[in-house]
Image (spheres, rainbow, N blue to C red):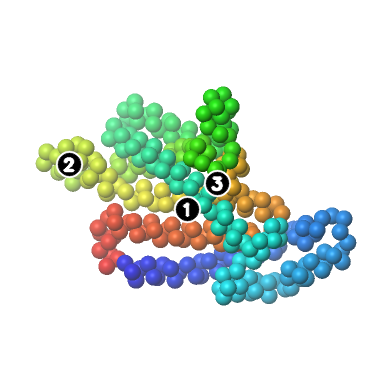
Amino acid sequence: MHKYIFKRLLLLIPVLLGVTFIVFTLMYITPGDPAAIMLGEDVPQEEVEKLRAEIGLDRPFLVQYGSFVKNIVLHGDFGTSYVTKRPVSQEILARFPATLRLAGAAVLVSMGIGIPLGIISATKQYSIFDNVSMVFALIGVSMPNFWQGLILIMIFSLHLGWLPASGFSGFKYIILPALTIGTSTAAIITRMTRSSMLEVIRQDYITTARAKGQKESKVINKHALGNALIPIITVVGLLFGKLLGGAVLTESIFAVPGVGRLMVDSIKCRDFPMVQGGVLYIAFCFCIVNLLVDILYAFADPRIRSQYR
């Protein structure tokens, strides 16, 4: 297991280097001059060229990219934001706790809804409950987050006054954005849980467990669910990694000071260092989440654990 984890961590290096090169190239060829945006429209061209020289935008592409990678590897420096004049790492770390809390709460909501619904739908296939659950799952997948968020604000904030409509300074502030994201992702987990459980409960060992006289709850929860967890863990991991990158629309609607909202604002302002650092952070989060998912496979399935050994 330790050797496997070490190999996966080594594989992060070429992945992150590839991500940095692609993002740096895209930002380099994107129309718009960051120096001109920072100074404004009425500033003389001499001042713009002076600022371009100060922040290194007048150097060749490969020189800029090499300097960017060198600062990250040797000093852990992702650059300084063109807008806030603060280090990019500080800006991202300041926004990361809000995104992490929102992502964690949304995943808990989606798992709390999706896994039980998927299990019951599979054990009661083609029943009224199964049909209704699949209809709601289809609605949840199809419903845009921005529309659902606005509807929740109108109901629970404007009409009922139970929950705040924006901000992120307490437990009440996380409920509506977590529900907005969690209910849509719960639909995906419900469908995956149902299909995975249907495949497992038709296996011979489930029939054998029932023939031995074991309780139906033990057969479903221990034997069936334990062997159906691999696809569910995969989907939950991908959703969590995606949410760690920032739920852009939800963060914008509920004024959550997260990484997604920071990325959108940085792209609008052509804040190259912030965009590059943010994308690198998202790629790193995805890689770490995928590594954790692979480790969870070993705990969920003894056959995979024996392969790691």
Residue type at mark 2? Thr
Residue type at mark 3? Ala
Which of the two discs, 2 and 3, sits closer to the camera? 3
Front position in the image: 179 or 8: 179
Please tell me whether mark 3 sits on a helix, a strand or a loop.
loop
Q: Classify residue 163 as left or right of residue 204.
A: right
Q: Relative to residue 6, is residue 278 depicted above or below?
A: above
Mark 3 surroundings: few (<14), some (14-19) or many (≥20) residues within 10 A: many
User: Is there CB contact under 8 Å for labels 2 and 3?
Assistant: no
Residue type at mark 1? Gly
Mark 2 surroundings: few (<14), some (14-19) or many (≥20) residues within 10 A: few
Please tell me whether mark 2 sits on a helix, a strand or a loop.
helix
Q: Quadrant of residue 94?
A: bottom right
Front position in the image: 245 or 93: 93
The residue at the point 63 percent across, 63 percent down is 87
Q: Classify residue 116 as left or right of residue 161.
A: left
Which residue is under mark 2? 207
Upstream in the sequence, badge 2 or badge 3?
2
User: Is there CB contact under 8 Å for labels 1 and 3?
Assistant: no
Which residue is under mark 3? 247
Which residue is under mark 1? 241
Quadrant occupied by the C terminus: bottom left
Q: How many marks?
A: 3
Q: Relative to residue 132, is residue 230 depicted above or below?
A: below
Residue 277: mark: none
